[in-house]
């Protein structure tokens, strides 16, 4: 009955203490005013049944008590309230562009570089529900796997489907960055970010990496670059007639170029040498690129006393009608 209801003047509930006092007073008065008749025998009343009027003789008093209870509730000023929060956010547009060349199958990351990169990117996407995120992949050429979207379920499905054999082998680093810029340059977001990840040296494509960086700078796109690969050599699987065999291959990452790309666009270069470091890098980027969110709390109160006052009036009216009709007593 009072779910979600508060009272502006709860001290009026102390008046409910009058109810037992009135009940005691009523019982005392009834006993005092009851007439006494002396009879030699009660046999004459055998089989007598009280009428409905006699059974309900105390109804007017009960109605008056109910009237008093609801009047006290009305005086306590019951109020219903609704409250909530309005959220508004300034999202960030982010393109994840990463290398899917053959060297990403190296197993210095578990299970390999490309699968480790996909898993960490999935967690990153889950942590940014308000942002539009897109996906570009590159090998010897580049391809937009998913344009900017807030439908992160679709984005993650497309990310999970990425394989190293989807594109011509090679490392077109400049084209991977240029394609990402093309997808984000016209964005109206307050912040435009590209996360560029590779494990090699630019050896394909028609766009030089530093030229692409200049374009990113012109469109106010910040680029975070990540070099993926352990220091020295890494185990790489080769398929042979005798099954998969491993060979240690040298890890070559053009860190100088990656640093120049990041610095010229206001980003930062990171080197990931294992799964945990790659995960930490994405977490650091997540902290640096926080979405601005504002929360406005609101509360609205509605007066509910009128309902209880009307119920009290109804009980009083019914009590008066019954007292001067059905239960009217002669003087």
Image (cartoon, grey):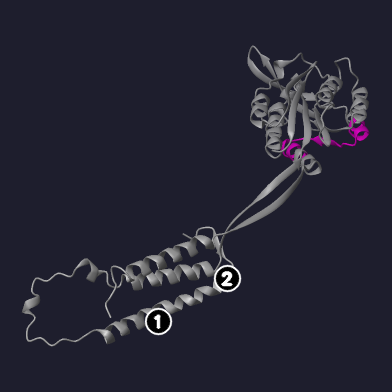
**Disc marking residue 21:** 1
The C terminus lies in quadrant? bottom left
Residue 31's x, y, as percent?
27, 84
Task: Give the spatial CA distance, label 1 vs label 2.
Answer: 23 Å
Q: Which residues are magenta?
A: 259-281
Circle 2: element type: loop
301 left or right of 144? left
In the image, residue 215 lies in the stretch drawn in magenta: no
Figure disc tally: 2
Q: Main secondary structure of the magenta part?
A: helix
Circle 1: element type: helix
114 left or right of 33? right
Q: Residue furthest front?
A: 331
Task: Check disc 2 and report the residue beneath it.
Answer: 9
Q: Which residue is at 9% across, 71% downward? A: 47
Is residue 218 visible from the viewing direction of this image? yes
Q: Which residue is at 50% across, 58% downward? A: 3
The residue closer to the viewer here, 200 or 51, is 51
Residue 184's x, y, as percent?
81, 27
The residue closer to the viewer here, 282 or 90, is 90
Task: Give residue 200's quadrant in the image.
Answer: top right
């Amino acid at each position: 009955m009072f779910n979600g209801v508060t009272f502006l003047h709860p001290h009026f509930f102390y008046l409910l203490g009058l109810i037992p006092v009135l009940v005691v007073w009523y019982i005392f008065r009834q006993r005092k005013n009851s007439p006494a008749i002396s009879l030699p025998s009660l046999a004459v009343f055998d089989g007598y049944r009280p009428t409905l009027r006699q059974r309900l003789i105390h109804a007017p008093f009960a109605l008056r008590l109910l009237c008093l209870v609801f009047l006290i509730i009305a005086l306590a000023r019951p109020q219903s309230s609704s409250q909530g929060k309005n959220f508004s956010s300034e999202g960030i547009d982010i393109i994840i562009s990463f290398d899917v060349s053959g060297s990403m199958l190296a197993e210095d990351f578990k299970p390999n570089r490309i699968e480790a990169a996909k898993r960490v990117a999935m967690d990153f996407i889950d942590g940014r529900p308000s942002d539009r995120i897109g996906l570009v992949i590159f090998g010897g050429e580049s391809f937009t796997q998913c344009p900017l979207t807030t439908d992160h379920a679709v984005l993650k499905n497309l990310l999970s489907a990425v394989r190293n054999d989807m594109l011509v082998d090679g490392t077109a680093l400049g084209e991977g960055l240029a394609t990402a810029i093309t997808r984000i340059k016209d964005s109206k977001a307050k912040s435009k970010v590209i996360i560029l990840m590779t494990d090699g040296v630019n050896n394909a494509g028609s766009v030089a990496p530093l030229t692409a960086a200049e374009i990113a700078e012109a469109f106010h796109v910040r680029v975070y670059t990540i070099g993926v690969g352990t220091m020295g050599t890494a185990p790489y699987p080769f398929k042979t007639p005798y099954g998969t065999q491993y060979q240690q291959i040298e890890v070559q990452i053009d860190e100088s170029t990656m640093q120049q790309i990041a610095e010229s666009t206001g980003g930062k270069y990171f080197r990931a040498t294992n799964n945990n470091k790659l995960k930490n890098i994405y977490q650091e980027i997540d902290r640096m690129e926080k979405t601005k969110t504002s929360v406005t709390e609101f509360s609205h109160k509605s007066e509910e006393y009128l309902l209880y006052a009307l119920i009290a009036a109804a009980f009083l009216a019914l009590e008066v009608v019954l007292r001067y009709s059905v239960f009217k007593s002669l003087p």
